[in-house]
Amino acid sequence: MGVEKRYAIGRPEEVRALNGVSLVLEPTEFVSVEGPSGCGKTTLLNLLGLLDTPSSGRIEWDGRPLAARIERERSRLRLTEVGFIFQRFYLLPTLTARENIELPLRAMRTPAESRRARSSALLEQVDLTPRADAFPHQLSGGEEQRVAIARAMANAPKLILADEPTGELDSVSARGVLKLIAEAHNRSRATVLLVTHNPEAARIADRHLTMRDGRVVADTAEHR
Amino acid sequence: MKRRTSGRRGHLHQRLQTIFAVLAIGTAVALPVILLSVGGGVSQHELNSLENAGYEIAVSGSGIHGVSSAHSLSDRIANLTEVKAASPILSQPIVAFLSGSGPIPVLAEGVVPLAFEASEGPTERSLFPSPLPLGDPTDSIRFANGAYDGPSASKVLISSPLAGALGVTTGTVVLLSGSDNRSAGASFTVTGTFGVPPSALGPTAAFAVLLPLSDLQILTGTAKLPGVNGATIDRADTIQVALVGSAATNPGTVLAVSSEIQNLVPYYGVTNLADQATQLGRLANVLTGFYLALSSVSLTIGITFLALVQLRRVEADRRTIGVRRAIGLPNRMIASGIVLDGLRLAGIGAAIGVATGIVLIGVLAAFGSGSVQEAAQLAIFNPVTLALVVLGVLGFSLLSSGLASRAAFRISIPETLR
């Protein structure tokens, strides 16, 4: 509520990336966010994903205030409650596809057998079982993003944050990735926030936000 | 293509950093390995020499040739209970002349043959002929109760290295003089040779000539004061006292006999080898501490280099570290990777350092010269010491890993994901 994020505070070059954004995300909602470059979409995503802290305002999950928590607690919440899908995939280059997917499960100290079973199931969901042992540099862009989606789903998160997941893909791969995100949302009933320039992505969402200059200027939820 | 080339270059840089970090640690470890192994070996050798000496107590006076009336004092000490032999020793530089040769400076040792033999340790016993072929076993004929009127046996032993260098054999006649003045010399017949033990704390072939004490005293003016009626001074450097049987290894008995001797000669210093061994042991500990202090400088440099390399790696891996933190991996998982990397580099470097130190010592022992070669040949490789050095390096690598981990935890996640 009333979240602001300022950089270079107090200096002549101070920037307001978010300027008093108030937003409520309901459970299981699929929300798309669009806007020009520099309007604060990624900053909003980073704050919701606890990757950053607001300069002022409140962020709450299920009524629990989060912003003031120490990094260790925020990290724990990211691991257990949030799944990230990045524009540039950001798979770890020294791990295979399966190992990338299992990484969050390792952090949860999940037993090896359970990890394997879960990663196999996810690989099947993203249609990459034959490529389980390939390294990221051996995968196409679309395949890398599908592995990233599987990694995001590994710990059954309640919130999925996707930052322009089709930004680096061709149209065919992009369609496949969006379909997978929609399927993941339907299967898991997690809340999804999708930052995108892609009009097809906007179509699969239930709710659309438009941002300009650090503010939400349009929200289809307000018209219901 | 550009991306691939810069990726390859980055990979090459990382490899070079790894190699240099390992070499830095290796160099840092090699130094203490060499210092501790050689230093420890030399100290242990000297301690062994003391422990293997054939005598337990030493009497010495102040100044050069500080013991006077050496013959009679030795006899009085030899008469004490528990004393097996009291051997006076005089060391003096003299000059040897061979037929047709110029002056050859040598270090000579004057002894009472029988007493000297009785106070030999196991090592010396193997180096000297038995009995010592120096003529008068008790040196009493030449000494003639302090008048030095008796005939000289005119016999001398020469060290094997000197004999080899001069081409001298048993039966050769050499002229020995207390100075460069050939006419002041006396002829001696070489009756045998003796071996030379290695000693890194003294010159090679510490003494080259062994002859009866009275003969050396007369050659060097330490028998009587100058002048026709000069008083007998009968100088020596030390009297080495050997005890009988079990008394030699009984600290109480050694102490008791030392006190008796001290009462006889209150104006002389009386030390027992146990005290000397303790002092040498303390000195060895001080030296070890010094070696470690010296080594800590090189180790600090090595670990600092390792820390720089690890920090550089964290910087190079900003993106992957940021991604790991973004998806919620706990700090322990990120830190463990850094720590394991540091331990790996430090471990490999330490192993290379230990191997390099051992090889270098071997090379010095085989191909070095003079005291460096002797010292290297005495090196002792104590596995516990080497293991402690390696563990120390591994322990310090945890410090550098800690620094690198802190840097990793401070990486701004949003910045790395841009």
Image (spheres, coloured by chain):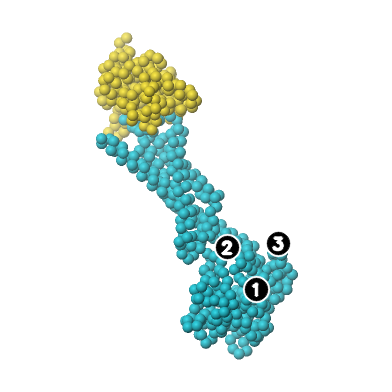
Q: Residue furthest right?
A: B81
The residue singled out by tag 3 in the image is B250
x%, y% of residue B333?
45, 32
Give the label on residue B46, or none: 2
- Check disc 3 and report its element: helix, strand or loop: loop
Given the image, on which type of amino acid does mark 2 rest? Answer: Glu
Q: Residues within 10 Å of mark 2 (few under 14, many from 20)?
A: some
Given the image, on which type of amino acid does mark 1 rest? Answer: Pro
Q: Is residue A121 left or right of residue B47?
A: left
Q: Name the image quarter holding the C terminus of chain A.
A: top left
In the image, the chain rendered in yellow is A
Q: Is residue B382 visible?
A: yes
For residue B117, above or below residue A187 = below
- Check disc 1 and report its element: helix, strand or loop: loop
- Gap between marks 2 and 1 measured at Cα: 26 Å
Q: Quadrant of residue B402?
A: top left
